[in-house]
């Protein structure tokens, strides 16, 4: 039981304090090793981050935000409180 709590605290600290580039790499390795999760590529691009799942791309300020948007599969619901999202063809 104590081991689980320690592990959870370490995960939390990593999520909060890891640099964005390291966070993105660790997440992609995790998804590659766990087939039940979709593999999402996360990479930096001129001041923002791109999360790509299959042919869909999501442009966000942080890789942590990219993960949330792709898992919910509803970008509007995630971001509409901050700005209006328009889909392009």
Image (cartoon, grey):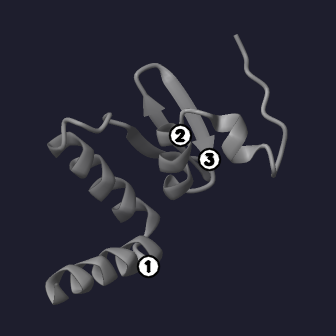
- Which label is found at residue 17? 1
In front of the other: 3 or 17: 3
- Which label is found at residue 26? none
Among the 4 quarters of the image, the one containing residue 41: top left
Query: Where does the image place residue 35, in percent across and percent down from the top left?
Result: 19, 36
Residue at left 56%, top 43%? 69
Query: Where does the image place residue 6, in percent across and percent down from the top left?
Result: 23, 86
Q: How far apart are labels 1 and 3 at the CA level?
A: 18 Å
Query: Where does the image place residue 63, in percent across and percent down from the top left?
Result: 49, 54
Where disc 1 sits, the SS reads: helix
- Say which residue label 3 marks: 60
Residue at left 34%, top 64%? 22
Where disc 2 sits, the SS reads: helix
Residue at left 32%, top 34%? 38
> Can you tell which of label 2 and label 1 is closer to the viewer?
2
Residue at left 47%, top 41%? 71
């Amino acid at each position: 039981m104590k081991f689980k709590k320690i592990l959870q605290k370490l995960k939390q600290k990593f999520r909060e304090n890891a640099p964005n580039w390291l966070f993105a790499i660790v997440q992609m390795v995790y998804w590659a090793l766990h087939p039940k999760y979709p593999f999402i590529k996360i990479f930096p691009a001129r001041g923002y981050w791109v999360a790509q799942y299959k042919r869909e791309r999501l442009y966000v300020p942080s890789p942590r935000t990219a993960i949330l948007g792709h898992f919910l599969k509803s970008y509007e619901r995630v971001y509409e409180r901050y700005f209006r999202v328009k889909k392009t063809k």
